[in-house]
Amino acid sequence: MTLAELLISEPQREKGGETANERYDYQALWGLALIFKHHASGQDYALAFEFHDDILQMNSSSDPTLVKFYQVKTKDKGHWTLSDLTYRKLKKTPANADGCDAVEVEPVADSSAPKERLPSFIGRLFANYLAFPDHTESLHFASNLPCEFISETTAECTFSECDPKTFAKFLKKLKSEHPEATEENAKIIHYTRADLSLHDASTHLKGKLNEFVTEHLGSVMYNPDALYTTVVEECRSKSKYVGAIPSFGELIRRKSITRAHVEGWLDTVRSARAVPAWEAVSAGLALDGLELAKWSRLWAKYRALALDPGNEGVGRIRARIRSEILALSSEQLAMMDLISEISKRTLSFALSNMSPMDQSTLRVMALYEVYAYDPAGDVQEVDPQLEDSQA
């Protein structure tokens, strides 16, 4: 089987009730930070949320051959100890709840019979390697706090890099849970410091998003709040989806963020960069004073909407307007005639997809899209003197 087929066919483990919204939210936000870090590699990837483990990072969105597994845990203070990582809670099934899922309970002083235990953090992580031994690139225990036996300044390392006595204890605990573990395959288990604050993750991630955009597009004007809301909500929705995943295509669609997704986010910012300021656009419009003032307000409003790729209604109208621009590209119409013709052709469609909507709003939308339009599919740069000076 290919890795794509194995990921779908291999049953997922029970999660033991660890489904708190706060945990999901931090995982989704940190997953996005991980995407920002990896995107610069230039290689294809797909990052899946809450599938086999908290986060899966695959080396392809179509035909993966390698996968990294991340288990993301948070703590308010202190350090992770070896005991924390390898501790196994007792498993107990309620006597009056036949067929119910197992629940976690604290150990009780009863030595009359052996007790079944739940997996430890590290044991649960290592189970991914046992399920996918030929495709697991690495296993990561990721947290906002350090391990007490690893330097606090270390961002990432394998557990085998800690002192030999500690690693020997670590390996002994792992073997007691998974006898298949060896010193060699245990070397793929990493500690990863989650560089995202626990109690102010949103603010911290907004800063990372801005750094990411600047890194890939340079210093550009865009609506950071609209972009942040769009990308974060997309990650959250992927993390929280609990429906069936019958195929690898559904895994990508329902649970994953891919390189193509991220390029789409960047394209949104690139399109804003191509549109000149209203002052440059309005100079050539044949409008009376009141109508010109109205169009100015509508232009500012629509520019913000156009920078929000999560607005599906606006997205559909934009696509329809662009198709009409392409259809009319050989007509060599004057600007006002072109805007009027596009508006006439798209009014009925626009009314069904956006409210409120009127003729002036649609004409301003058409005007904006004419300036943003690039028939080659690549955004064209404009004279720096025409670039908008406002976000």
Image (cartoon, rainbow, N blue to C red):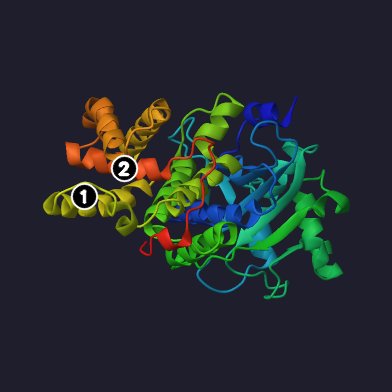
**For numbered disc 2, what is the local secondary structure?**
helix
Residue drawn at 41 percent across, 48 percent down = 230
41 relative position to 294: left or right: right
Please tell me which residue lies in front, 313 or 148.
313
Q: Quadrant of the C terminus?
A: bottom left
Q: Amino acid at mark 2?
A: Leu
Q: Position of residue 182 (x, y in %)?
A: 86, 49
Which of the 4 quarters of the picture holds residue 96? Answer: top left
Q: Position of residue 330 (x, y in %)?
A: 43, 27
Image height of 240 relative to 195, above or below? above
Count of labels in the image: 2
**Location of mark 2 (residue):** 367
Image height of 97 relative to 122, above or below? above
Measure the C-alpha gap from mark 1 to mark 2: 10 Å
Q: Position of residue 138 (x, y in %)?
A: 75, 49
Which of the 4 quarters of the picture holds residue 65? Answer: top right
Please tell me which residue lies in front, 226 or 8.
226
Q: Position of residue 136 (x, y in %)?
A: 75, 42
User: Which callout, 1 or 2, points at the residue further toward the start of the chain?
Assistant: 1
Please tell me which residue lies in front, 348 or 170.
348
**Location of mark 1 (residue):** 295
Asked if the residue under mark 2 is in contact with the one under mark 1, i.e. CB atoms within 8 Å, the reply is: yes
**For numbered disc 1, what is the local secondary structure?**
helix
Please say whether residue 359 is visible from this viewpoint: yes
Q: Farthest residue toward the left? A: 290
Q: Quadrant of the N terminus?
A: top right
